[in-house]
Every structure is written in C-alpha cells, then in structure tokens.
C-alpha cells in the first residue's frame, strides 16, 4: 500500500472536466474559461449552465435556464414553518444545513436518481438556497420571508429577499461577480465531501448536506466570517500592523490567508480586492479597506503568505450591508452550483470513494484482556 499524504495534499482523487486550477501560476478557470473573463463578461446564470452542461449556453438556452432558476426559488411552506420554530440565535449555517436536508422530504423528484431528476433537483436547490438564507435572516428579526421575484436575476433577487429592496446596478453587479467567483473550485473540501456522499449512490440532498457541514468550518468557508470579526476587532488602521504581528507571534492562523493549492495570489482575491476598494470607498467605509491592505502587506512581508478568496469577500459583503454570520451561507448560495455540477459528474462515471488508512494503533494481534483483569 502507498504511504499517505497528510490532508491528501496534491493527491489526485478523480478525473474532472469542471474546474482547472494552476496553483503555481494563479490560474482558475471553469471548463477552461478564465475566471477573470467570466467575472467581467458573464453572469451567475450563465456560469451555472457552463458548470452543469460543460459549455457556454446559446441565448435561448441561457434564457430558459434563467427562467427555470427563477421559477424554482420557492421553498415549501412547511419548511418556512419549521424554520420559524428554530432558536432565534441559531447559527445560520446550521439552520441552512438542517433545512437543505429537510427539503428532500418535499422534493417532487426525491425518489428518483436519474440524471434528469438530478438536474431538476440541481435547479431547485440552486434556486432555493438563496431563498432560505434570506429567510433565515428575516425570521430571526421577526419579519416574514419575502416571496421571490421571478422578474429579477439570481443576484438581484437574493439582495431583494434579504433587504426588501431591489439593489441598484452597482450592488447587483458586485453581488453577481461574487457569485461567479465562488461558484466552483475543483476538489475543495466541501465539494469532495459532496462527491464522497454521492459516490455511495445516496441522494443529491444528502450530498449537499455533507457539503454544507464541511463548508461551515473556519479552515474552509467559515473563514470569511472570521476575517470580518478580526477587522472589527482591529477597528482602526493604525492598530492593524501591531495586531497582526502580535497574532503571528502567538502562532495564530490568520483567516483569509494561505491556500492548499495556490502558491501565488488567489485569482479570486485579485477581483475581490478591487471590488472591496470600490465598495468601501463608495459607501464611506474606506477604513475597512485600509485595515485590510495593512494586514495583507504585513502578512506578505512577515510570512510571504497571500490573501485567499475569503479575505476581501468579507469587506465586500460587509459594505453591501450583509450581517457577518451570513457570509458563509452566502458562499453556499453560489457554491451550490459547483457542488451539484460535481455530484452530476461523479454519478456519470461512479465508483465508491473509499481510501485506506495507514494503521498506527497497537500491533496486531493485541490481547483481549477479560474485564475483571483490566
Ligand atoms: N496564517 C498564518 N500562517 C499560515 C496561514 C495563515 N492563514 N496559512 C498557512 N500558514 C503557515 C502555517 O503555519 C504553516 O507554517 P509552518 O510550516 O511554519 O508550520 C505553513 O503556512 C503551511 O500551512 P498549513 O496549515 O500546513 O497549510 P494547509 O495547506 O494545510 O492549509 C489552509 C491551508 C487554507 C487551511 C491554511 O492556509 C489556513 O488555515 N488558512 C486560514 C483559514 C482560511 O483562510 N481558510 C480559507 C481557505 S480558502
């Protein structure tokens, strides 16, 4: 048996045609199309088509998918009733994970694992996750969830459901780009968890529930919330450098920095840095960008470690008025597209994912001592 690599670093677990990353050059692409070009020219709906079907849609195909996603945003009333009974201070990621799991009980295709049924479930889940995340925030404030507006695109509809106001063009574009940048990332931990679950021929809601539980952790999607908590704790630019040096001297991991695959700048951070600067300046919150820059420069000079996707997404969401504990659920509003694309791909050529452990316990055969002799 081959020896193990801790954390499966650089282990190729399966072929995949969805996402290409070159960690040395800082390249990320969906189906070979560079993420910068997609962020500039595409939309979340078009990226969903690309991830699910392997190519860019023609106009009619894009219109059809946009309409289908908009039609699939409603969440069964039983689910909303259930959500109203949850503790008001519940962790939004735990609520989202619980609710996505419960959605399968009401899904019209729950009994079928055919590709057509799984595609319909992918549309529904992608439509519904945004509705659920917005409903979590409204319910805990004692407000009624808002009914989705099918005339709005995915990004604008989400902002509308969350705030009750239709966003202006700048906020809509910013949120749409954030959705594009977070949509997929090869075999990241949550996607891998989804594929492991799908690989047992379990259902798509179970695989998504696995993914959500995995995304929650602060080493993965939970990092964006930790970044904002750190920036708020620092509070003022003049405190940033000393704060960071002190944290590093205590050997703390700084959220929003470092990456298993990128050894240069995370290409998503390049976009989010610019967006963060624009939004911080236009909303009169320049200090959050200034603190972020000092932290980034100090991390580079002290440790030569780069910012990842979660570092600047924190201030992007914050200046869009999104509560900090919704940052990770919002990651899921986008990543559900990548998870479902990977689940569909796993099922196309499925084999159970079942690695081995390098055994480090007592040597075999160990003695079984009777209970009265222990
Ligand atoms: N802050 C401080 N030091 C860091 C660091 C960070 N964010 N990320 C990596 N390092 C250091 C480690 O201390 C280690 O140094 P050492 O060899 O002197 O012990 C080295 O870099 C390698 O780190 P390691 O944790 O082994 O890398 P990994 O590939 O296992 O982990 C992450 C990758 C992303 C989990 C890790 O960089 C991290 O914890 N980042 C913060 C959380 C985060 O932002 N997650 C979102 C990722 S998109």
Image (cartoon, helix red, strand yellow):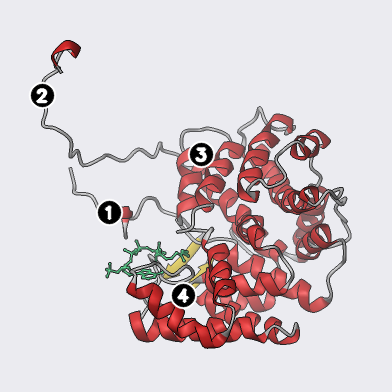
> Disc 2 or 3, which lies upstream in sequence?
3
Residue 227 x %, y %: 54, 69
Foreground of the two, 24 or 46? 24
Question: Does ligand 1 reach within 8 Å of label 1's beta carbon?
Answer: yes
Residue matched to label 2: 365
Kindly identify which numbered label has been placed on residue 198.
Answer: 3
Q: Secondary structure at mark 2?
A: loop
> Label 4 belongs to which residue?
27
- In this rendering, the label closer to the viewer, 1 or 4: 1
Which sits in the foreground, 1 or 16?
1
Q: Is residue 311 visible?
A: yes
Image location of residue 224, percent across then percent down: 56, 65
**Which label belongs to residue 6?**
1
- Mark 2 close to ligand 1, CB under 8 Å: no
Image position of 307 with respect to 117: above or below: below
Residues 317 and 189: in front is 317
> Which numbered disc, 4 or 2, marks the residue that appears first in the sequence?
4
The residue that appears at 19% across and 38% down in the rendered structure is 359
Circle 2 or circle 3, nearest the eye:
2
Q: CA distance from mark 4 to mark 3?
A: 28 Å
Say whether mark 3 is within 8 Å of ligand 1.
Answer: no
Earlier residue among tags 1 and 2: 1
Q: Residue at x 54, y 81 (%)?
A: 292
Q: Give the position of the N terminus as an image quadrant.
A: top left
């Amino acid at each position: 048996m081959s020896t193990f690599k801790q954390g499966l670093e650089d282990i190729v677990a399966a072929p995949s045609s969805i996402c290409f990353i070159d960690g040395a050059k800082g390249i990320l692409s969906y189906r070979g199309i560079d993420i910068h070009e997609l962020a500039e020219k595409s939309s979340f709906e078009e990226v969903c088509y690309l991830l699910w079907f392997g190519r860019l849609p023609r106009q009619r195909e894009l219109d059809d998918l946009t309409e289908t996603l908009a039609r699939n945003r409603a969440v069964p009333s039983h689910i909303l009733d259930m959500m109203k009974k949850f503790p008001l201070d519940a962790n939004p990621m735990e609520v989202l994970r619980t609710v996505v799991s419960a959605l399968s009980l009401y899904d019209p295709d729950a009994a079928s694992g055919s590709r057509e049924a799984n595609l319909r479930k992918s549309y529904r889940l992608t439509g519904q996750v945004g509705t659920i995340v917005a409903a979590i925030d409204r319910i805990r404030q004692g407000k009624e969830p808002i009914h989705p507006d099918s005339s709005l695109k995915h990004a604008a509809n989400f902002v509308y459901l969350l705030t009750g106001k239709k966003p202006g063009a700048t906020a809509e574009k910013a949120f749409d780009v954030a959705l594009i940048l977070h949509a997929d990332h090869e075999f990241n931990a949550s996607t891998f968890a989804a594929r492991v679950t799908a690989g047992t021929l379990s259902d798509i809601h179970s695989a998504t529930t696995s993914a959500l539980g995995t995304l929650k952790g602060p080493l993965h999607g939970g990092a964006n919330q930790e970044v904002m908590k750190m920036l708020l704790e620092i509070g003022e630019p003049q405190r940033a450098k000393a704060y960071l040096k002190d944290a590093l001297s205590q050997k703390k991991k700084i959220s929003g920095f470092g990456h298993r695959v990128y050894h240069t700048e995370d290409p998503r951070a390049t976009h989010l840095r610019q967006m963060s600067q624009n939004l911080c300046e236009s909303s009169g919150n320049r200090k959050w960008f200034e603190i972020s820059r000092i932290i980034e420069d100090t991390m580079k000079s002290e440790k030569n470690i780069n910012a990842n996707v979660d570092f600047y997404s924190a201030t992007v969401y914050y200046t869009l008025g999104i509560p900090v504990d919704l940052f990770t659920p919002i990651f899921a509003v986008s990543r559900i597209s990548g998870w479902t694309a990977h689940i569909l791909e796993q099922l196309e050529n499925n084999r159970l994912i079942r690695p081995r452990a390098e055994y480090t316990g007592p040597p075999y055969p160990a003695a079984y001592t009777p209970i009265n002799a222990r």
